[in-house]
């Protein structure tokens, strides 16, 4: 008899968990940085078109694989392509999730440190140089970065330990509304600052003359990065989705939620930056150095600085939950290990790699490769190679290996939903357009960036 798997208990739970997987630190700081570097509103316009035309079909592909198989990332390909080498796609996804969780937990731990700094009013009266030096000193501390990293992984493991309905669904249904409340509070504050209108103009008034191949490729890369396609999280979550749920509306809801968070983050950052004459800079410096200085200069900045770093921590947690779920589901189902033991094993492996990544950021660390810290190498490996490769193989599998009728059965709930021209357009994009676009992204990231 087939063992009954845990499932999401509600449509809201599916959307909250899947959107939480997509929403992460990249939405809060990376998206605004990309907007700042690539023409402002022109970049956003291209980004939105890409999400609609490509992001939704590719995300839907992952959901289809997951729900069709009702298995973990590796088991899905064993079920849908038995006896073939397609299982390698699943193994790549699990490895990718493990590596990302490892170095992502490093940055996630930083959010806890900075919540403490904000609560103790550490940033008061400090200029940007002092704040940057404080960040360097923290990275070089022998124990604190690792302590916060381990605490964050333990918190993630606790939620995964509880299962899908009582763990992932329960907590993401709390975390996601909290994230939106904080976003709205910070948006309102940013919009009340003097000179904020210039930031809004930069964000929403496109200069179409700025659109070029660089902006288009950058928007493509950011859309794939932001939606978390290619790493298997959505295949794993899809395997828990009830057969009665509409996968198309679920996918649309997740993409809209993820994009809304990115836009709201821009509304927080750009009006504030323009108000204080600060240009947003790329990388971690924006969130951990520049913004604390801005908060210190604004009325009520102490309070808003705290809730901003709480926002970062929540965004990070919703992502680490999905990453660990990929690993735990794989271990527990493929090796017949209890979920509790699989959670301990998966989080321990991530902790070992993650600690090495954290230590590699210290001054004069020996944990380097190609003259770069291990952390940077893991980031490059996943973002520039494994994610595009995973996404490419997934769309190839759905379009060329998986039977077309099976795809249509899943997105039409076995014919109960109309299988019209929209579904045919989606399949055409998955089969022909998406592979070309993903290859272009790969070439751009590997050789042109």
Image (spheres, grey):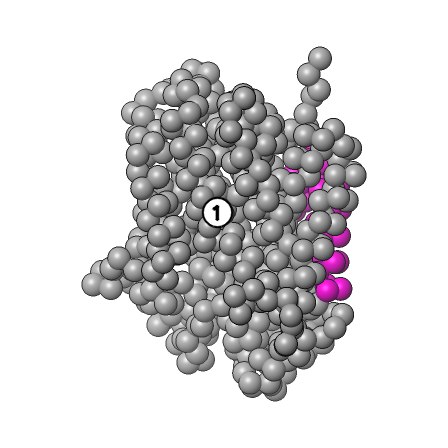
**In this rendering, would 19 be left or right of 44?**
right
Mark 1 secondary-structure assignment: helix
* Magenta stretch holds residue 155: yes
Q: Does 204 sit above or below residue 257?
A: below
Q: Residue 435 at x, y = what percent?
A: 35, 39
Frontmost residue, 91 versus 18: 91
Which residue is painted at 56% across and 28% down in the image? Answer: 76
Q: Is residue 264 left or right of residue 218?
A: right
Residue placed most toward the observer, 11 or 360: 360
Q: Residue at x 33, y 67 (%)?
A: 202
Q: In the picture, which quadrant includes the C terminus?
A: bottom left
Q: Is residue 260 visible?
A: no
Q: Residues within 10 Å of mark 1 (few under 14, many from 20)?
A: many
Q: Residue at x 54, y 21 (%)?
A: 82
Give percent across and percent down for residue 155. 73, 52
Q: Is residue 376 above or below residue 176?
A: below
Identify the main secondary structure in magenta: helix
Does the rendering let one see residue 342? yes
Residue 212's quadrant in the figure?
bottom left
Image quadrant where one finds the N terminus? top right
- Tell me which corner region of the image, top left, top right, bottom left or bottom right, holds residue 134: bottom right
User: Relative to 45, does residue 242 appear above or below in the rendering?
Assistant: above
The x, y position of residue 367, in whole percent, is: 63, 66
Q: Nearer the viewer, residue 254 or 337?
A: 337
* Residue in front for this viewpoint, 127 or 137: 137
Task: Say left or right for 355 vs 244.
Answer: right
Name the residue that disc number 1 marks. 387
Residue 90 position, x and y percent, is 55, 35
Magenta stretch encompasses residue 5: no
Q: Count numbered badges in the picture.
A: 1
* Residue under the image location 43 percent in, 78 percent down: 278
**Highlighted magenta segment, given as a residue range:** 146-174
């Amino acid at each position: 008899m087939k063992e009954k798997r845990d499932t999401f208990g509600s449509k809201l739970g599916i959307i909250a968990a899947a959107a939480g997987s997509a929403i992460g630190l990249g939405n809060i700081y990376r998206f605004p940085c990309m907007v700042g570097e690539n023409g402002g509103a022109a970049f956003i316009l291209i980004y939105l078109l890409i999400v609609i035309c490509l992001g939704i079909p590719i995300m839907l592909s992952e959901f289809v694989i997951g729900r069709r198989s009702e298995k973990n990332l590796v088991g899905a390909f064993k079920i849908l392509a038995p006896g073939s080498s397609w299982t390698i796609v699943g193994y790549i996804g699990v490895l990718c999730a493990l590596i990302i969780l490892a170095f992502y937990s490093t940055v996630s731990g930083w959010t806890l440190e900075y919540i403490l700094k904000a609560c103790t009013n550490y940033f008061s009266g400090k200029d940007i140089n002092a704040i940057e030096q404080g960040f360097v000193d923290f990275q070089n501390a022998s124990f604190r970065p690792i302590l916060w990293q381990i605490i964050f992984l333990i918190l993630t493991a606790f939620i995964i330990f509880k299962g899908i309905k009582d763990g992932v669904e329960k907590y993401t249904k709390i975390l996601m509304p909290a994230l939106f409340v904080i976003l709205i509070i910070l948006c309102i504050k940013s919009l009340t600052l003097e000179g904020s209108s210039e930031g809004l103009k930069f964000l929403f008034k496109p200069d179409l003359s700025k659109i070029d191949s660089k902006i288009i490729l950058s928007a493509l890369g950011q859309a794939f990065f932001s939606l978390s396609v290619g790493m298997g999280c959505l295949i794993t979550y899809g395997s828990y989705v009830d057969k009665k749920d509409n996968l198309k509306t679920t996918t649309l809801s997740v993409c809209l939620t993820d994009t809304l968070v990115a836009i709201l983050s821009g509304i927080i950052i750009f009006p504030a930056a323009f108000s204080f004459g600060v240009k947003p800079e790329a990388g971690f410096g924006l969130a951990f150095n520049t913004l604390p200085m801005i908060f210190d200069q604004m009325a009520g900045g102490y309070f808003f600085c705290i809730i901003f770093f709480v926002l970062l921590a929540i965004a990070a947690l919703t992502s680490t939950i999905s990453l660990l779920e990929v690993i735990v589901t794989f271990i527990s189902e493929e090796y017949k290990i209890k979920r509790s033991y699989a959670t301990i094993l998966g989080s321990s492996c991530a902790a070992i790699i993650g600690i090495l990544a954290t230590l590699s950021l210290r001054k004069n660390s020996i944990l380097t490769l190609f003259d770069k810290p291990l952390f940077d190498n893991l980031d490059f490996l996943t973002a520039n190679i494994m994610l595009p490769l995973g996404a490419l193989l997934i769309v190839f599998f759905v379009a060329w290996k998986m039977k077309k009728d099976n795809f249509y059965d899943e997105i039409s709930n076995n014919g109960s939903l109309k299988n019209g021209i929209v579904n045919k357009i989606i399949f055409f994009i998955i089969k022909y357009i998406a592979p070309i676009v993903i290859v272009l992204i790969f070439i751009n990231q590997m050789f042109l960036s």
